[in-house]
Amino acid sequence: MTQPLPEFENPPVVEVALSVQFDRLDVTTVQLGTVWQRFRDRFARVEEKLELDAAFERFGPPEKKVPGVRFEVGGLPTPRLWFIDESGSELVQVQRDRFIRNWRKIDGQPNYPRYDTLRAAFVNDWEIFSGFVAEELKASLVPNQCEVTYVNIIEAIDSSRLDQILACISGSNSDEYLGKPEGAEVQFRYVLKDETEKPWGRLHVAAGSAMRATDNQPVVRLSLTARGATASKDTAGAMNTLDAGHEAVVRGFTSMTSPEMHTAWGRKS
């Protein structure tokens, strides 16, 4: 029987992003922009950003690349659109090969609403976007990779002493969930495996000293991203992979942080 996920009364999370990457749509900037009409009642503000590059977790020998010349035909690249709600804490991002649903901690707004709430919001808005693709583009979304990202801001007496926060830096995690990292630089990278020990994705972790924007106080920024291939190339497969990614982030966060920090965050399970 699977053990229940660790839970904290006051987790240090300040941002969550649930993302599904899909096979690229044949869509123009004008066409992509019209999807806002389906979100504008809740997301009144629109911003344009650069597209995120496609990201894939691969295993096995590296693929051989054939030298060649790449030609770009056409005008400016299709942008990534941000749809932002009135509070600034809820955000939808769309581009021609990705859909992202964000929550961000904003002063004066409720704290982290928990994964089940964010998951339900993602499902609702993904279905709206899927409807747009079906009706306006006469196409369908074919998921290929999913990402779950949690960003944490951790207050510390000395933000340069990461060993006081991250048990993994001392070489001894809080439990055995993560095992040994596949590689380590400034970041850590762990392989995620299914019940048959087959790799399906990776957990990417980055930690470092930072200054909090609101008061310029030294803090530690700890981000965890679980990314992997969808269990199947449909909505159900994408949601299963997002759920698996959420579990990897929560268990990985708990495993690599210290028992002292767990007490400070009010660990309940």
Image (cartoon, helix red, strand yellow):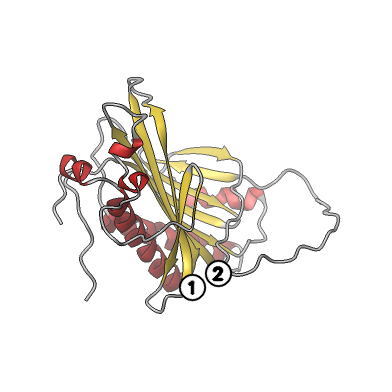
Q: Residue at x 50, y 55 (%)?
A: 99
Mark 1 near mark 2, Cβ–Cβ under 8 Å?
yes
- In this rendering, the count of numbered labels is 2
State whether residue 57 is above or below residue 223.
below
Q: Which of 252 and 246 is in front in this view?
A: 252
Say above or below: 86 vs 247: above
Query: SS class of the residue under badge 2?
Result: loop
Residue 136: image tag: none
Looking at this view, name the residue that lies furthest to the front: 171
Outermost residue, top side: 216
The amino acid type found where label 2 is placed reads Val
Tell me the SS state at disc 1.
Answer: loop
- Within 10 Å of disc 2 (Cα), the crowding (few <14, some 14-19, many 20+) is some
Amino acid on which the number 1 mark rests in the picture: Asp
Q: Is residue 212 left or right of residue 189?
A: left
Single out the residue that lies furthest toward the right. Answer: 69
Q: Position of residue 151 (x, y in %)?
A: 37, 43
Which residue occupies 49% across, 41% down? Answer: 186
Viewed as shown, does residue 26 lie left or right of 7?
right
Residue matched to label 2: 142
Residue at image location 48% in from the left, 70% down from the top: 199
**Disc with the residue nearer the chain's start (1 vs 2):** 2
Judge whether 239 appears above or below 100 on screen: below
Give neighbour class at mark 1: few <14, some 14-19, many 20+ (Cα, 10 Å): some
Q: Which image quarter: residue 263?
A: top left
The residue that mark 1 highlights is: 234
